[in-house]
Amino acid sequence: MIPFLHLGPVTIPTFGLMVATGLLVAAYVLQAEIADPSLLISRFGFAWFGGFIGGFIALVFLARHYRIPVLEFMDLCSPAAAVGYAIGRIGCLLSGDGDYGISTKLPWGMSFPNGVVPTTERVHPTPIYEFLIWILIAVILWQAGQKALNGEAAGKLFSYYLILTGVARFLMEFIRINPRSFFGMSNAQAASLVSIVLGIALLLRTKSAVPASAKET
């Protein structure tokens, strides 16, 4: 495990480094400057849902600044957000910050004896799982985005993002070590359900909306 990089007197947390890298890659995918290098100075990362809310608010401000309809902008950002999250999870793996899963006897189980939250048990490397799943989600969203260029109602791609990431995180929590709170669920699972419900509601709204191309005809 490599929780920190020591470059002379400078100590850089690998989680913060990977989060910033994820944002930079997301910015490249989006073709916009949305990355904040100041994340490098943070020793630990941020919770998934809190990060989502913070990112959502930032994107709303960006959309208003550039005078782009908010839902259209969220559609544009969805594949990039999935890629950024995936790369951020590599930071969790490098730092061993406790985002790993429960113990396992599977051959790809890993231990994190030198992690920020150390364990000598072989556990599910959930950051790797999430990296692969979120990259898959990004590919799905990218392909769906190509089809959405045909004049579909704004917000459809974002609704897919909310649903897919919500389902993925909800299921992932069953092998994570997070404490349970709401009706036996973890906080992340409860937040995931909110994401799924919002995504379904938005998807139903987009299906009932009239696409711009239909209005023109």
Image: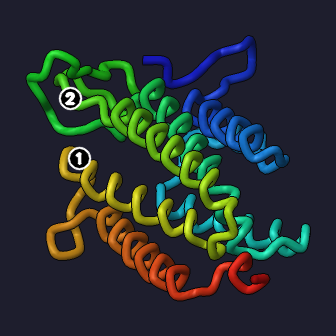
Instruction: Indicate the position of residue 38 as horizontal and vertical percent values.
Output: 76, 43
Amino acid type, residue under disc 1 in the picture = Ile
In which quadrant of the rendered image does the C terminus lie? bottom right
Q: CA distance from mark 2 to mark 1?
A: 10 Å
The amino acid marked with disc number 2 is Val
Q: Secondary structure at mark 1?
A: loop
- Residue depicted at x 89% and y 74%: 67
Q: Position of residue 73 (x, y in %)?
A: 73, 65
- Quarter of the image holding residue 10? top right
Q: Point out the residue furthest to the top here.
A: 8
The residue located at (75%, 43%) in the rendering is 27
Provide the residue designation for mark 2. 123
Task: Say if 168 sits above or below 98 in the image.
Answer: below
Instruction: Read off the residue under disc 1.
Output: 177
Furthest toward the right, the residue is: 66
- Asked if 183 appears above or below 33 in the picture, the reply is below
The residue positioned farthest toward the front in the image shown = 217
Q: Is residue 41 visible in this depiction of the protein?
A: no
Which residue corresponds to the image point at 12% horizontal and 29% vertical from the top-left? 104
Position of 70 compared to 207: left or right? right
Residue sitting at the far left: 105
Q: Nearer the viewer, residue 208 or 17?
A: 208
**In front of the other: 58 or 37:** 58
